[in-house]
Image (tube, rainbow, N blue to C red):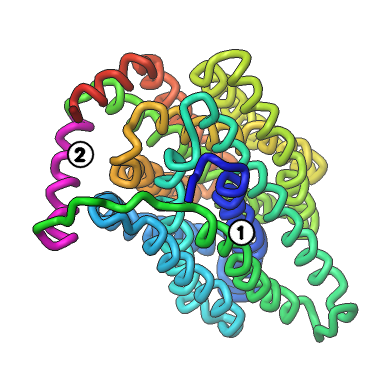
Amino acid sequence: MQNNTKKSIYAWAFYDWANSAYATTVMAGFFPIFFKSYYSVGADVTVSTAQLGLANSLSSFVVVLMAPLLGAIADAGSLKKRFLSLFAFLGILMSASLSLVGEGNWELAAFIYALGNIGFMSSNIFYDGLLPFVSEDKSVDFISGLGFSLGYLGGGILFALNVFMVQEPSFFGFEDKVEAIKASFISVALWWALFSLPLLFFVAEKKKHKKEKQSLIVAGYFRLKKTFERVTSLKGLFFFLVAYWFYIDGVDTIIRMAVDYGMALGFDSSSLIMALLIVQFVGFPATLIIVKLADIWETKKVIYLSIAIYIAIIIFASMMKEESEFYILAVMISLVQGGIQALSRSYYAKMIPQQYAAEFFGFYDLLGKFAVILGPLLIGGVALLTQSSRLSIASVAILFVIGGVLLFFVDERKTSKEVREALD
């Protein structure tokens, strides 16, 4: 099977369409709202913010521990698709399981949510690792952007249906909004499972011709050790990964905590949901436009532009007072959220060799997920210390500033040459 076909490219990109339903309906949408109003009913808003931040951070920490070694094992044994399937199944199962948790049982809800996050984030490591197999240097920006844009559209379509279900529960045969939200968690599981099939059937993973003499775990460990030594010795790659660590922390923290922040300001949950829908449907074309801009300009410059817009977003968010301003915030986020993620992934893919893709993306995702440990804790900690939601969201700006400064020291072409010479 050849991967340089439209069928394999779209099959790969459709996994973003599949699992983005979890990112929108569960992570960004209904779970934060349901966690405050149902799972942790009666708790102070700053306490529930800290609880949600802790659940996000712990799940990210588990992925941090697993990601590099699993990536190395996947490369050693050509197991990217198998690991993707395994962790996707975990996320699918946990999404459906959220529907079984009762009112006030925030501990169980947080535990299941954390396991679902582990499945979602871990499957993305191997999804990212397959990007070099379906793209070439000249097409990697477009294909990476295609995945994110389809993710916005697919996640937005199911989320819109779920919002309609919650607003009109009787139309769908549900007794109330609680039953409708629980049903939406099940719909995410079904959507994720169904649209994962094209990747599993139509994207080929090149198999190793030479059998490993050691066990895959031992082989993976030695590959991981070598990769760590290489990453830390290659200045350009190291600076990019650390820069990415900081600025993607800000991106992911805003994704996960924006609705919680809106609720802490006293905004109506229905307004927050509508703002999320705006992000999804504006984000679809905006991501493709940002990726096209990278073709005209340079990928690194467009990442810088996105960082600058995010700093403006945070300043605006820390000062907003009206619900209508949250819609403006949503449009601003949707203009750059998919673009900075897609271009960061493709920029990194240009610097690493195909045969080490999952291994190097294990480090890439490790830093991204380790950042998500710090971001929600930063917001939750500042909220508890200052009793100010505005100061907590403002604190995220420092992450973008540090990331932007470190990115200055990265030269994509020079780094790509250094990486290939080091691996020869």
Residue ID for mark 1: 18
Q: Residue at x 44, y 58 (%)?
A: 123
The residue closer to the viewer here, 345 or 173, is 345
* Residue 160 pos. (x, y %): 78, 59
- Measured Cα–Cα span from mark 1 to mark 2: 31 Å
Q: Is residue 63 above or below residue 235?
A: below
Place of residue 206 in the rendered image (x, y in percent of width and height, measured from the top left): 36, 49
Residue 357 visible in the displayed image: yes
- In percent of width and height, residue 355 lies at 30, 40
Image quarter of residue 155: bottom right
Amino acid under disc 1: Ala
**What residue is at 68 percent from the left and 32 percent from the top?**
288
Find the residue positioned furthest to the left.
213
Residue 179 image point, x, y percent: 73, 81
Residue placed at 55% from the left, 37% from the top?
144
Q: Which mark is residue 316?
A: none
- Quadrant occupied by the C terminus: top left
Tag 1, which secondary structure?
A: helix
* Residue drawn at x 69%, y 38% as measured from the top left: 334
Is disc 2 placed on a helix, strand or loop?
Answer: helix
Q: Is residue 211 left or right of residue 131?
A: left
Left or right of residue 396, residue 330 in this image: right
Give the class, few, some or many, for how many residues have Cα within 10 Å of label 2's Cα (few <14, many ≥20): many
Q: Which residues are magenta?
A: 214-232
Q: Which residue is mark 2?
A: 227
